[in-house]
Image: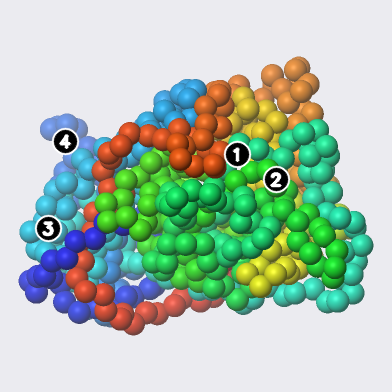
Amino acid sequence: MQRRTRTLSSALASATALVLLVPPAAAIAAPDSDDEARGTVAATPTDSTTGTAPATDPADKISRAAEQTFAARGTTDFWLRFDEEPDLEAAEGITVWSERGRYVYDALTAAAEKAQAGTIAELEKAGAEYTSYWAANAILVEDGTFDQAVELAADGDVVEVRPTVRYSVPEPVKVPHAADVAAAEADGLTTWGIGAINADDMWAEGFTGDGVVVANLDSGVAPHSALSEKYRGAGASNPNAYNYFSADGLYYPHDTNEVSHGTHTMGTMVGGTVVREGVERAVGVAPGAQWIAAGVGDDLSDENLVAAAQWILAPYDQASSEPTPDPDRRPHVVNNSWGAEFSTDPFMENVITAWEAAGIFSTFSNGNAGEAGCTSAGSPASRLVNYGVGAYDMDGVIAPFSSRGPGQSGTVKPDIAAPGVHVLSTTRTGTAYLNGTSMAAPHVAGAVALLWDAVPGLVGDVPATRAILDASAHDENDTSCGGTADDNNVWGEGRLDVLAAYRLTQDEEEFEATPAPVISGDDYRTPFPGSSATCRRPGRSSMPPPMTRTTRAAAARPTTTTSGARAGSTSWPRTG
């Protein structure tokens, strides 16, 4: 994150409190069908006589939530959303991993530069504090006033002004009772979840995730013997460059969350063996894969989440004074065990769709509000474009807490179900059994790593991979929340089976019925010079910085944390 120091103009900004009312939604997300009801500026009709759109009053671009925030606080941080959205469809046909990522990066940065140029010039002129995000095509303005927002909204490229939000952190995940732990440990030398999805059978076939890089956007990842050797930066002279992002400014792997949430989810994806009660057990679905991470700690603010998601698209050395984003070093798979329950809000959706355009497969936990009944699925998992994961237990029974659909516009959610009860994995202090759809989603992410190791032609082909996972899942008939026997709002397509998914790809007739892969996978195993890590080719030596920021000396800012978990709620807890 590049920072420059300037004096803040008293004409446009003053001291502020960070006000947190509602998710910024369209400020950093694709429009939703109900955006107008939430305060989003509706599309302006074209004047049939002149062929041009009539002028929009800049004040009409201020969302109702932003107006309320300004009225209550006077000054506040706020988002500016811009209209320019590049067409990334062509990326799907690019068969070289490095070139595909570069194409998406160049398209996004070019669109943001074009759309934001006028506004940035005004902010620079005023000496205001701001951060420009190319992945979301949005600018976060700090210490702003209503008059400043209206003035900036006069730019024709600005379509909306939104307030910021900091999401609430959930209560720690309940640890199972001792009797339940004993039952889980009776399964042998792997966790029960590994056997349930037949990951160990994939290992027997020779596929462990070799050459695939996974990431999580989570609380962080702490050093652990079952993870350290699998870190992509292991053995490199500058191990954390391009491999670790942290919102708290500590540019090395760490996790301060009470239950080591991010460390636990990473262990489920790629962890090796752990020792518990004197017995070694394998915990990771894809132990041959490597990992990188974007950590936000317990501060799930919209700014931190968007910054971390942007880093996933084009990692850079966070400790460098002149960071150079490199989309070639993006991960293949990213797990997201966080979300807002009872929500279909399109938070960060344009960034997530850019992940897919770049060939990144993303998984999302469906939420832990299942005991409230149907329509409890949480965003982003509840969104049509995202792959949501429900949870089941050792007996093959859906977990009571696993959130039910339907999701956005009545779509079936979750998409699939995976082990999420009594899941043993890594923590910063050792190991722990945890429950949650947060524990289920990384099983799917690890399964994708195994599948892409086994079938390189699938690498980067997200639609085909989803279709294969769906078609090979074991059906579970529960239509209590709607759907069908083989695709319903309790189980989705059913129970994950990575071995069945692999075998489906080997059945030529069945495989040809899925969308055709477009990524060759030929170059994604190439190591970087000077590193022992297996990863992709380095990119060009120079590139625009990840964002532009003008800032003054850091100062403590009072914050208001939103809470609650009902429809329309601003609570965005990690779902695990």
Q: Is residue 15 visible?
A: yes
Q: Which residue is mark 3?
A: 124
State which mark lies toward you, 1 or 4.
1
Residue 545 percent across, percent down from the top left: 27, 48
- Taking depth in this image into account, of 51 and 356 the one nearest to the observer is 356
Residue 207 percent across, percent down from the top left: 74, 35
Mark 4 or 3 closer to N-term?
4
Q: Marks 4/2: CA distance? A: 55 Å
Structural crowding at the residue carrying mark 1, measured as other residues with C-alpha within 10 Å and reported as few (<14), some (14–19) or many (≥20): many
Q: Marks 4/3: CA distance? A: 30 Å
* SS at mark 4 in the image: loop
Mark 2 or 3 closer to N-term?
3
Mark 1 in CB contact with mark 2 (< 8 angstroms): yes
Q: Residue at x 79, y 64 (%)?
A: 275
Left or right: 42 as drawn, with respect to 127? right
Q: Which residue is mark 1?
A: 212
Mark 1 or 4 closer to N-term?
4
Q: Quadrant of residue 16?
A: bottom left
Mark 1 or 2 closer to N-term?
1
Mark 4 in CB contact with mark 2 (< 8 angstroms): no
In the image, residue 485 sits, relative to residue 454, either above or below, namely: below
Residue 192 percent across, percent down from the top left: 84, 56
